């Protein structure tokens, strides 16, 4: 397979790499996304339109049989060169705008392949495409447009006795089409590896015959879809300018611009998706973690909106939902993350003399909610510590183990962060806080139970006995509450744990390499490796921040290797220009979700820290 040249070009920052069959992803403010390779490696690649609670897939790909030779990532569009043709992709709220140039050869013409369906509908029965082809005179300037109106009907079975749903798609182009109309079996390498079930049949609709512009839109009916697609072509220059105007980056070091673009791609409306293609929700833990990168980039207004939204859904029992809107799932660490980000926001605004931008009413509301959360948390404490249930920490999967139930080190750090946030809010709003401060004293005293010589334990089991399993959560505890121990103690703890989880390629494993649960290779939908071996990029970045803060000289080589690995993932692996969720422990790769927000956010923080 040909190695394609890759160039990242963002507002003066340029990075060049290379990869075989590079994949990319772009989004719009609706939450729609376009992810393509050539060929695609996943059923989740294609053009997806966001509905109220899910996605509808429409286009599988727009490509010829030739291999990709280069990929150029701008902050506002993607340019892909396939032998004999060039494509530029712009994703607008009305749909996809494609500019295409065919340089030579008949087989360089891009083919439009359909794979219409609702996300997770992998039934291969009752799938019917109806296509109408016509000419539409758009304007004297634009002239005649070639129109393909596609109606996809999904029946409940092959008897076609009842309809499950329909999709109406329009493809409008300045170029004529040559129809193909052929079903084809498509195999997806990454899905096969992950053992993800998918419908293999896609529909090759037509080739684009000439140079020009093509627009693709989804509508409630064919008329609406055509109106959107034609409208995009009539306004194509304005649309391109509009997309470019909203992509202005914050002031960041040049090295951090690609990671910022990765994070900004996942900003949907007034929040952050946890990741794409399958974490397309606001997750409390992920979104609040991402506020670190947003604050580092000076995105204060967005952080305020995120924090305010999570305060608005504090439950009567003082807990927070794992997902917004509330789906009934609980996150044991979300209240602490909310407290940490309140602290971080207030400190950042104070440093810039902008604390006045937060209204008194807002601060009082946050103060009252943190107080409610603490009151309920205290009722669940035992022996001076906060205990977590089965699969409720960020390591929320289990495989023949205890699901990390018990008292966990990062959960105690998060409780301290919540207490500190409440105390600060009380101070600012001139409210009594003495009683709540006692919680912090109790936790700090009992946190000594986590120390065993040079070792900081990952936690205590439900029965109070020590859990000597080595995991990287001690670094997470430092990130959340660095004053839980003094710097010399942290250095000692890190030096003890690091050799047991260090990976030569520049990451850390999620459990000790000599642990009986350790899986060296990513296991996909089988969660055996997920929190039992896989290396998490967001944790790797936090590890580097921790090491740099406690002893940058002593850990210089380790820090450098982590930074190099995270930047390699961003620039070369997975979705090019995005930060992956995890990697196998045995060898660096892009695995899990290929565009993960907290991986990008923590990389921004790390790059800014090292730039100081």
Image (cartoon, helix red, strand yellow):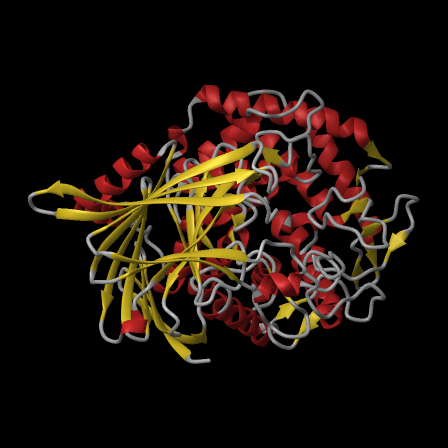
Q: Nearer the viewer, residue 361 or 69?
A: 69
Question: Is 414 positioned to the left or the right of 216 in the image?
Answer: right
Q: Position of residue 325 (x, y in %)?
A: 57, 30
Q: Position of residue 206 (x, y in %)?
A: 34, 57
Q: Nearer the viewer, residue 559 or 52?
A: 52
Quadrant of the rendered image containing residue 530: bottom right
Residue at image x 36%, y 56%?
A: 252
Asked whether residue 291 is in view, the answer is no
Q: Is residue 382 above or below residue 379?
A: below
Quadrant of the rendered image containing residue 431: top right
Q: Position of residue 271 (x, y in %)?
A: 46, 38
Image quarter in which the C terminus is found = bottom left
Residue at image x 52%, y 69%?
A: 563
Q: Which residue is at the far left? A: 140
Q: Position of residue 266 (x, y in %)?
A: 45, 47
Residue at image x 76%, y 40%?
A: 443
Question: Is 408 positioned to the left or the right of 255 in the image?
Answer: right
């Amino acid at each position: 397979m040909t190695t394609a040249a890759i160039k990242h070009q963002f507002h003066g920052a340029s990075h060049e790499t290379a990869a075989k069959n590079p994949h990319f992803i772009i989004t719009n403010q609706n939450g729609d996304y376009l992810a393509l390779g050539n060929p695609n490696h996943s059923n989740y690649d294609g053009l997806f339109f966001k509905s109220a609670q899910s996605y509808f897939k429409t286009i599988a790909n727009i490509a010829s049989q030739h291999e990709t030779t280069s990929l150029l990532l701008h902050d506002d569009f993607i340019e892909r060169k396939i032998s004999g043709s060039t494509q530029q992709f712009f994703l607008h709220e009305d749909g996809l705008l494609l500019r295409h140039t065919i340089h030579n050869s008949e087989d360089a013409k891009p083919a439009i392949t359909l794979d219409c369906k609702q996300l997770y509908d992998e039934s291969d029965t009752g799938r019917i495409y109806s296509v109408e082809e016509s000419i539409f005179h758009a304007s004297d300037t634009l002239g005649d447009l070639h129109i393909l109106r596609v109606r996809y009907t999904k029946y409940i079975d092959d008897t076609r006795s009842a309809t499950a749903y329909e999709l109406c798609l329009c493809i409008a182009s300045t170029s004529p089409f040559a129809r193909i109309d052929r079903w084809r079996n498509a195999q997806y390498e990454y899905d096969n590896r992950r053992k993800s079930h998918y419908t293999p049949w896609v529909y090759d609709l037509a080739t684009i015959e000439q140079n020009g512009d093509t627009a693709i839109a989804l509508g409630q009916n064919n008329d609406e879809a055509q109106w959107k697609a034609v409208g995009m072509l009539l306004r194509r220059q304005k649309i391109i300018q509009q997309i470019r105007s909203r992509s202005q980056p914050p002031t960041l070091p040049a090295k951090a611009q690609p990671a910022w673009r990765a994070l900004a791609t996942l900003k949907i409306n007034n929040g952050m998706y946890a990741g794409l293609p399958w974490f397309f929700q606001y997750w409390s833990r992920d979104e609040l973690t991402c506020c670190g990168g947003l604050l580092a980039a000076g995105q204060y207004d967005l952080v305020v909106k995120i924090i305010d939204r999570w305060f608005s859904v504090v439950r009567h029992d003082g807990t927070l939902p794992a997902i917004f809107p509330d789906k009934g799932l609980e996150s044991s660490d979300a209240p602490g993350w909310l407290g940490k980000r309140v602290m971080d926001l207030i400190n950042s605004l104070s440093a810039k003399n902008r604390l006045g931008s937060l209204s008194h009413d807002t601060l009082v509301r946050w103060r009252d909610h943190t107080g409610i959360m603490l009151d309920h948390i205290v009722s669940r404490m035992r022996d001076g510590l906060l205990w977590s249930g089965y699969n409720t920490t960020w390591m929320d999967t289990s495989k023949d183990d205890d699901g990390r139930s018990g008292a966990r080190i990062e959960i105690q750090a998060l409780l301290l962060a919540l207490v500190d946030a409440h105390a600060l809010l009380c101070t600012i709003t001139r409210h009594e806080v003495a009683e709540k401060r006692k919680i912090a004293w109790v936790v700090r005293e009992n946190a000594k139970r986590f120390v065993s010589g040079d070792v900081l334990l990952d936690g205590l089991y439900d029965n109070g006995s020590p859990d000597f399993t080595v995991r990287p959560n001690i670094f997470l505890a430092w990130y959340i509450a660095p004053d839980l121990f003094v710097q010399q103690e942290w250095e000692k703890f890190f030096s003890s744990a690091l050799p047991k989880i260090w990976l030569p390629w520049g990451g850390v494993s999620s459990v000790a390499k000599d642990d009986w649960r350790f899986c060296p290779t990513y296991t996909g939908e089988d969660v055996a490796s997920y929190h039992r071996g896989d290396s998490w990029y967001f944790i790797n970045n936090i590890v580097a921040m921790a090491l740099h803060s406690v002893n940058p000289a002593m850990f210089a080589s380790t820090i450098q290797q982590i930074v190099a690995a995270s930047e390699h993932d961003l620039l070369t692996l997975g979705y090019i220009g995005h930060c992956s969720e995890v990697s196998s422990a045995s060898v660096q790769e892009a695995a899990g979700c290929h565009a993960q927000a907290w991986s990008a956010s923590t990389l921004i923080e790390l790059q800014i820290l090292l730039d100081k």
